[in-house]
Image: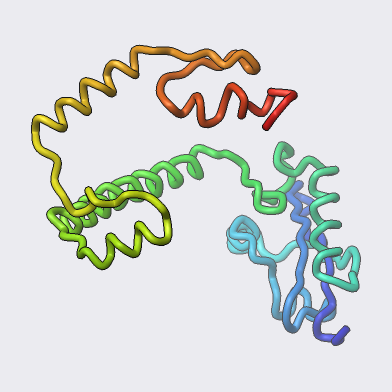
């Protein structure tokens, strides 16, 4: 392995404050000799503490590795053993990407999800407008029939109000029937039960 690519784990700490951080470094130009010279961890909490309390008094290279995978696995093992996510002494905010669920993180996730939901609704509306009253050419219908074996003669047509009402009444009638799978005892309505349960149920010992 190139001498500039030596994965390693390290430990830094502020003894008087009782705060510590255990991390891993890998990738291009990775060299234990340059630790705390041109690499100062990627932790935001560590950088915030450096600003308020200065450099740590404990700066150690704990272990070097022959591959990135081995380094990551070892770091994960140590962090789990030290229970860093539940111990206030440690500044580590995650183990292999698993974050501590703090109110701040939950709030950020909530805002992100809200934005995604709004964008999703807008996207669906745009797609709906694009495909509304879209006419499917006979050539396209023929290709769909040829490759799927399904009759697509209704593609590109708009159902009448009477037809929609008939379909609605039919679906309402079907929804009143509750089916119970004899294998897993799960109950549900409609064709989805027959698609995933009864003879096709995962708990059915004799499956076709």
Residue at image position (74%, 24%) is 205
Q: Is residue 115 left or right of residue 106?
A: left
Q: Is residue 127 left or right of residue 25?
A: left
Its colouring scheme is: rainbow
Q: Is residue 74 left or right of residue 167?
A: right
Q: Is residue 173 above or below residue 14?
A: above
Residue at image position (84%, 80%) is 33
Residue at image position (37%, 45%) is 111
User: Front-most of 17 and 46?
Assistant: 46
Whole-percent x, y for residue 12 in the image: 78, 60
Q: Is residue 112 left or right of residue 103?
A: left
User: Front-most of 131 and 24?
Assistant: 131
Where is the C terminus found, in terms of image quarters? top right
User: Front-most of 126 and 154?
Assistant: 154
Q: Quadrant of residue 177?
A: top left
Residue at image position (37%, 50%) is 150
Whole-percent x, y for residue 207 in the image: 69, 29
Q: Tell how many labels.
A: 0
Q: Is residue 123 above or below residue 40?
A: above
Q: Residue furthest left?
A: 161
Where is the N terminus found, in terms of image quarters? bottom right
Whole-percent x, y for residue 192 in the image: 46, 29
User: Front-most of 161 and 93?
Assistant: 161
């Amino acid at each position: 392995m190139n001498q500039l690519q030596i994965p390693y784990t390290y430990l830094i700490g502020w003894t008087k404050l009782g705060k510590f951080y255990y991390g891993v470094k890998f990738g291009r130009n990775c060299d234990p000799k340059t630790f705390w010279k041109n690499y100062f961890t990627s932790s935001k909490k560590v950088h915030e503490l450096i600003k308020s309390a200065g450099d740590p008094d404990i700066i150690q290279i704990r272990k070097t590795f022959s591959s990135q995978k081995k380094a990551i696995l070892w770091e994960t093992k140590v962090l789990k053993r030290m229970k860093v996510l539940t111990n206030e002494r440690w500044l580590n905010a995650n183990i292999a990407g698993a974050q501590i669920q703090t109110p701040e993180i939950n709030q950020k996730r909530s805002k992100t999800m809200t934005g995604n939901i709004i964008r999703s609704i807008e996207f669906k509306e745009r797609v709906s407008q694009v495909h509304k009253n879209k006419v499917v050419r006979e050539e396209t219908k023929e290709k769909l029939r040829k490759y799927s074996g399904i009759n697509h003669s209704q593609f590109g047509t708009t159902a009448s109000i009477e037809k929609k009402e008939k379909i609605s009444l039919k679906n309402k009638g079907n929804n009143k029937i509750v089916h119970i799978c004899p294998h897993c005892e799960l109950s549900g309505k409609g064709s989805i039960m027959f698609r995933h349960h009864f003879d096709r149920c995962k708990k059915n010992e004799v499956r076709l």
